[in-house]
Amino acid sequence: MSGTDDPQVDHYFTARPASAEQRRTLRVRLAGRDVEVETAGGVFSPDHVDLGTQVLLRTVPAPPSRGDLLDLGCGWGPVALTQALLSPDARVWAVDVNERALDLVRRNATRLGLGNVVATTPDAVPDDVRFDALWSNPPVRIGKPALRALLTHWLPRVATGGEAWLVVGRNLGADPLQRWLTDEAGLPTTREASAKGFRVLRYAP
């Protein structure tokens, strides 16, 4: 089932977990380790760790060793799994609206022996949880209004002393987004890196 007529964003709204026949194994490198994960069609970048996520993971500092960490728009889980591998004593929230993606994250966390990953829909995250780190390759193709609403909901939930790190394609509006977050949304955001057509943005309350 799709929530849009645009095939580029259909993967954000896939409702059903992938069947055994639809799932496939992928070897990737996460947190300095070669690991096997499961992916499937109907999620973002099912055949590899996409370039934007690679840029993000090469740029961000190590996550806090404890506390609550967030991967916003987790897909099959490269960011959340990296956070969980690096910080086994932290609780990692892998959040997505795509039930297929969430099922894959749960499978991958089990496969890697990671008991600290909570893969869930946005509405299921308790309102009182504050995040010591938020890492995201946000779903920019959902459109500007929806993306702005997403970020203005989640960025204020970063705890004082915590950090949010976003990777956004330059040609997909990274610079206007940074200006809007800083000048209009009251969420001052800095550009920390630029590589391979992507900007890495940082918000620290």
Image (spheres, grey):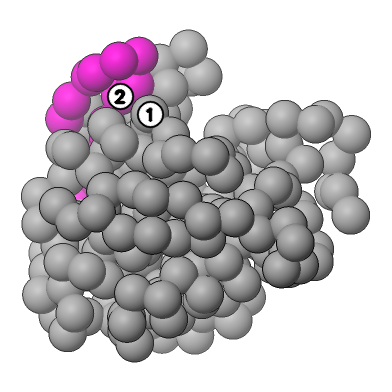
- Check the image and report above or below for 177 versus 80: above
Q: Between disc 2 and disc 1, whose residue precedes?
A: 1
Q: Nearer the viewer, residue 16 or 92?
A: 16
Task: Name the mark nearer the viewer: 2 or 1.
Answer: 1
Q: Name the secondary structure under disc 2.
A: strand
Q: Which residue is mark 1?
A: 51
- Check the image and report above or below for 175 versus 145: above
| Residue at horizontal 32 percent and vertical 82 percent from the top | 113
Q: Which residues are magenta?
A: 192-204
Query: Within the magenta stretch, is there residue 60?
Result: no
Q: Nearer the viewer, residue 75 or 73?
A: 75
Q: Which residue is mark 2?
A: 199
Q: Is residue 155 left or right of residue 204?
A: right
Query: Within the magenta stretch, is there residue 202?
Result: yes
What x and y, as percent, mark residue 34? 24, 54
Q: Amino acid at mark 1?
A: Leu
Q: Is residue 133 left or right of residue 50?
A: left
Q: Quadrant of residue 100?
A: bottom right
What x and y, as percent, mark residue 181? 39, 36
| Residue at horizontal 26 percent and vertical 71 percent from the top | 84
Q: Nearer the viewer, residue 34 or 146?
A: 34
Residue 16 visible in this rendered orientation of the protein: yes
Q: Quadrant of residue 118?
A: bottom left
